[in-house]
Image (cartoon, rainbow, N blue to C red):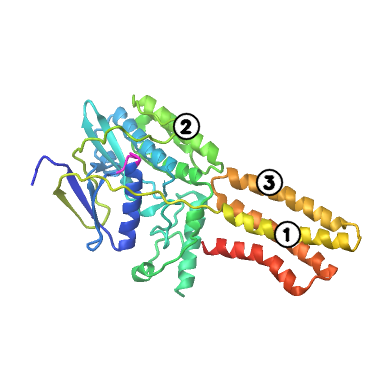
Amino acid sequence: MDKSGPKIYRKTFVSRYELSREHQILEYLGQRHAPVPPVVLSHVEMTYLEMHHGGKDLQEWFNSGSLTRQDILQAMAGALSALFVTAQLDVWHVDIALRNFVFQHIGPASGNRVWLIDFGNAICPHFALQKPLWMLPNNDQHPLLQTALTQDWQNFYKRHQLTEPTDWFTTFDVPRNIHQNDWIHGLLVEDLHLKWCVTAHGAGQMLLRASRKHPKLGAEWENLFSALLNLNDDKEARALLQQCLNRLQNASNTQDQIENHKTPRPRERAPMPESVKVPSVGRSEQTITKPEVPELITTQATGNHEWILGVPVFFLGSGWWVLDIGYSVQRQPISWLTQGTLLFILLISAIGMAGFLQQKNKIQWLVRVLWLHGIGQFILVFELWIFGMSLSSLIWLCLGPTLALAVLAFQ
């Protein structure tokens, strides 16, 4: 065996689901040159991944002592940069802690390298969760994350008719075998609508803990990190994270800064393999040496819900057209209820469509637009019923929004 090859870390998983999801996220990020360990091998039957070592985790490294102010700032800048890059790629690590970053000094020319690891507690729209995150709520988390985790576990206990803990913010036991066989979709933690705020809060808590261990950094950094906590605006959270990252990079003479609204571009050449090390995360591991193998090419999963909007729009428009013909045949003026309802639905639907097309979290806007169509459909059907249309025809007019909402609910 070639002793000069890169050191390999073997991470063993409890289930194939956990292995598969972490492998997919690591491959997705690795192909976009995010600062994560390169995957070398995935063994499904034995449920382990082999990846490059990345060095000491930051928690162990910060406790090692004899660190200079420059060392601390460089490590903080590397950790925040790794977190920022993965967030830009729509992978949101919700277990932000020093133990989930690994640090290694590459050499005088290359400086230091920080990787983000352990994506078992990450959310990503391209790789949906199928069971609750193996993570407990705690008071250090952003309030939105606390609430989502608590409600997901409450629903888990109710589904399986288990005795619920008296306090969800203290350690409680979760039956592992039941969790492994619990397949679910629509978890609340996956639908967090202020992901930059949650990320900024987690980063702020982590950086505050690190800075308080090393008072030599000064109060200016503690004030900067405290500003990341409990935010309620994603644009502000992202801007403050960028500002904090730039301050850390400037103070540590780090050159590679992340520009706003940009994600890393593919490199002309893949980086040369280097000796790396990844810390233990409480599961079995084994260090071996193995040549690097080429990355697997995977495709990015996407979702498209725009077509759902066309179904209720078509049925709603057809209903108003039928009603207009009825009024024309009976030589009656169009009622004020019809005119007012039509204008209201057109105005609100336009606002809803604008929000749907501009917002990143499109599902919430999609639901709002569909419910508005449902309200308009109800008023339309009521007026057609008064007008004398048969019940079977009214059912056909109601079918569009009902089918659209049903399709959305089961996706």
Q: Amino acid at mark 2?
A: Asn
The Cα–Cα distance between marks 1 and 2, rounded to whole angstroms, is 45 Å
Front: mark 1 or 3: 1
Q: Main secondary structure of the magenta part?
A: loop
Instruction: Residue 73: give x, y in percent of width and height.
Output: 34, 31
Q: Could you tell me if residue 219 is visible in this image?
A: no
Q: What's the residue at 56%, 41% (across, down)?
A: 233
| Callout 2: SS | loop
* Number of numbered labels in the structure image: 3
Instruction: State the mark number for residue 260.
Output: 2
Instruction: Residue 318: give x, y in percent of width and height.
Output: 73, 59
Front: mark 1 or 2: 1
Which of the marked residues, 1 or 2, is nearer the chain's N terminus? 2
Q: Amino acid at mark 3?
A: Ile
Pointers 1 and 3 in contact (CB under 8 A)?
A: no
Q: What's the residue at 76%, 66% (across, down)?
A: 381
**Dot 1 alpha-carbon crowd within 10 angstroms: few under 14, some 14 to 19, many 20 or more:** few
Task: Say whether residue 325 is left or right of residue 6.
Answer: right
The residue identified by callout 3 is 351
The residue identified by callout 1 is 318
Give the magenta range. 32-36
Which of the marked residues, 2 or 3, is nearer the chain's N terminus? 2
Q: Amino acid at mark 1?
A: Ser
The quarter of the picture where residue 315 lies is bottom right
